[in-house]
Amino acid sequence: MKEQFIDLLEYNSHFNQLLIKIYLENKDSFNEKMTLLLNHILNAQQIWNSRIIIEESFGVWQINPDEKLSEINQSNFENSIKILNERNLDEIIAYRNSKGDDFQNSILEILFHFINHSTYHRGQIAMLMKQVGLEPINTDYIFYKRK
């Protein structure tokens, strides 16, 4: 199971990094919503990691400096791999969401959630890219595996 999650985390990081590269090369074409969603993808993974490893978390919708995006993506990946290697996937994490409500989920559920969450928002960005005349990237998992 851990090997499968390592693969999914690598997939997630790869396409986040590609999206960051495209953003940095086309900042003038990216609108506010696209920029917000890109930052939100990175922020969400950092927040979920921080709930597990008990560190200070980002704001859900904070805008990060452009020059830090790749570093944040890499740090997110490394922290997620560390969690995967050092913690039990069945371990239950108690946390408070951004609205202040208390919840509990397993590490497995959390990892699956933020990977799926990232995929969802990358799809939204792809649609928005097309609307502004940019060629969207195909971030489907199967295309990643075909490389």
Image: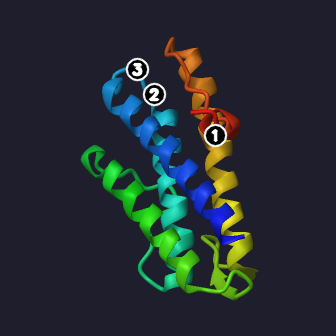
Packing grade of label 3 (10 A; few <14, some 14-19, many >=20) is few
Q: Amino acid at mark 1?
A: Lys
Q: Read off the residue under disc 1.
A: 145
Q: Amino acid at mark 3?
A: Ser
In depth, the one of 3 and 20 nearer the eye is 3
In depth, the one of 77 and 34 nearer the eye is 77
Q: Which of the 4 quarters of the picture holds residue 8?
A: bottom right
Q: Residue, x 45% and y 63% (percent of image)?
A: 76
Looking at the image, do the residues carrying marks 2 and 3 touch, with CB atoms under 8 Å apart?
yes
Task: Residue 47: give x, y in percent of width and height.
Answer: 52, 69
Quadrant into which the C terminus falls: top right
Q: Residue, x 57% and y 48% (percent of image)?
A: 11
Q: Residue, x 32% and y 26% (percent of image)?
A: 25
Q: Read off the residue under disc 2.
A: 31
Q: Which label sits on residue 29? A: 3
Packing grade of label 2 (10 A; few <14, some 14-19, many >=20) is few
Task: Tell me which numbered mark, 1 or 2, is placed earlier along the sequence.
Answer: 2
Looking at the image, do the residues carrying marks 1 and 2 touch, with CB atoms under 8 Å apart?
no
What is the total number of numbered labels drawn onto the structure image?
3
Task: Tell me which numbered mark, 3 or 1, is placed earlier along the sequence.
Answer: 3
Q: Vertical placement of 60 versus 29: above or below?
A: below
Q: Vertical placement of 77 versus 137: above or below?
A: below
Q: Which of the 4 quarters of the picture holds residue 35?
A: top left
CA separation, marks 2 and 3?
6 Å
Q: Residue, x 70% and y 37% (percent of image)?
A: 142
Q: Nearer the viewer, mark 1 or mark 2?
A: 1
Packing grade of label 1 (10 A; few <14, some 14-19, many >=20) is few
